[in-house]
Amino acid sequence: MSQKRSNLIDIIKGVMIVFILITHFNFIYPDDYKKYGFFFYIDMAVPVFMIITGYLHAIQFRKNDIRSFSQAMSPTIIIPKILRFFIPYFLIMLVEIPILFKVYDYGILDLFNTVICGGIGPGSYYTPAMIQIVFILPIVYFIIKRYDFFG
């Protein structure tokens, strides 16, 4: 099977990255945010990323001939996906943890809660959300595959 890459998906992801950068920009004129209708398209960047993630996972299931839920949840499939998110996350947390102790005077319980919730700051939800996707997406995929009307 030849490898086909969709340029359209790459373009959409690139536009969504720009939109996400815009959402993190402090607007000098907050009325412009409403005036130009940013909430209709710029605030949709993360949901579009989630839709693309689901689509690409479904393609991956088909490409790898994964036909059952147990195959999709096998360690050979799950572990690489989890490591893809955990390795960079823990590297970032190695930098963030000393800052939390020194600057924010965090205790052990505060630190534990922060690590579980993804850290601090914009985008801290990303790693926990992606880990949930790794475990929830196969459930959704096989429900839709079995019962088309749920899709």
Image (cartoon, rainbow, N blue to C red):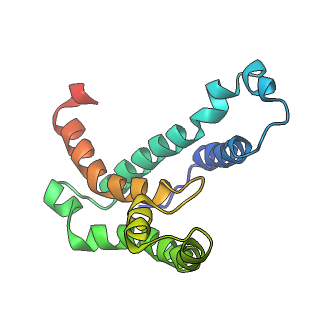
Nearer to the camera, 127 or 104? 104
Quarter of the image with the C terminus in it: top left
Q: Is residue 120 left or right of residue 81?
A: right
Seen as rendered, the residue at the extreme right is 28
Percent x, y of residue 3: 49, 61
**Residue 28: x %, y % from top left:** 85, 36
* Residue lying at 14% horizontally and 60% vertically, measured from the top left: 70
Q: Nearer the viewer, residue 109 or 55?
A: 109
With respect to residue 144, does 104 lie above or below? below
34 and 136: which one is in front?
34
Q: Position of residue 45 (x, y in %)?
A: 59, 39
Does 63 sit left or right of 23 as displayed? left
**Closest to the observer, 48 or 127:** 127
Q: How many numbered marks, from 0 up?
A: 0
- Give percent across and percent down for residue 133: 35, 52
Q: Residue furthest top?
A: 35
- Residue placed at 40% from the left, 46% from the top? 54
Q: Which image quadrant is residue 86 in?
A: bottom left
Q: Residue at x 21, y 44 (%)?
A: 142
